[in-house]
Image: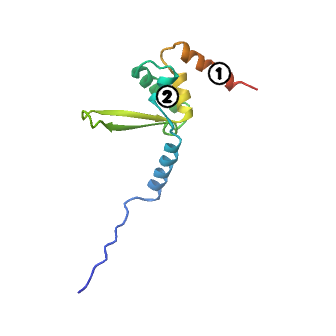
Amino acid sequence: MDTLSIVKYSSTNQESFMDALQEYINLKNMKYDFDDLFEAGFLNEDDILKSIQDSIQWLELSGQDSNRYFYSCLINSQADGSVFRYWKMSREGLISAIIHAPTLNPRLAKIRWNLLKSAFAK
């Protein structure tokens, strides 16, 4: 009886492999999320989303790839079936979000001041 070999050829090419590798590297740096922004002093989710949106716009206007600093995915809640966007960010993304906070409070103001001092420390 004759047998046939089945060989599965990948539909990916070298470029998509490199894109996947770059995405993996970027994701390794995404160590922060909403909880870290709440801890930094953000009071509500709307302010966080506005801050992330402004940060992404600022990065793109300055010629940076925002995917290196922010990553979002859709999460499906098993509890109620709702879908929501989950954000992860790198350290630089976190700092950018803090800088772009649409509202200030004493905690965020202090963090911004410390960021400014450390940026210009000799």
In the image, residue 33 lies at what x, y percent? 46, 32
**Nearer the observer, disc 1 or disc 2?**
2
Q: Residue at x 48, y 48 (%)?
A: 24
For the question of whether residue 63 can be seen, the reply is: no
**Residue 61 in view (yes/no):** yes
The percent coordinates of residue 105 (x first, y second) are 52, 13
Between the residue at mark 1 and the residue at mark 2, the CA separation in whole angstroms equals 19 Å
Residue holding disc 2: 36
> Which label's residue is closer to the chain start, 1 or 2?
2
**Residue 104 x/y as whole percent:** 51, 14
Please tell me how many numbered marks the rendered image carries.
2
Residue 18 to residue 35: above or below: below
Figure quadrant of the C terminus: top right
Disc 1 marks a residue whose amino acid type is Leu
Q: Is residue 93 left or right of residue 74?
A: right
- Does residue 69 appear left or right of residue 5 in this picture? right
Residue drawn at point x = 47 percent, y = 50 percent: 19
18 w.r.t. 89: above or below: below
Q: Nearer the viewer, residue 108 or 20?
A: 108
What residue sits 53% from the left and 41% below the top? 29
Q: Is residue 103 above or below residue 31?
A: above
* Residue 116, numbered circle: 1
Task: Name, please, the residue furthest toward the right.
Answer: 122
Q: Residue furthest bottom?
A: 1
Element under disc 2: helix
Q: Amino acid at mark 2?
A: Asp
Give the residue drawn at x 65%, y 21%. Answer: 116
Give the left or right position of residue 9, taking residue 64 as reference: left
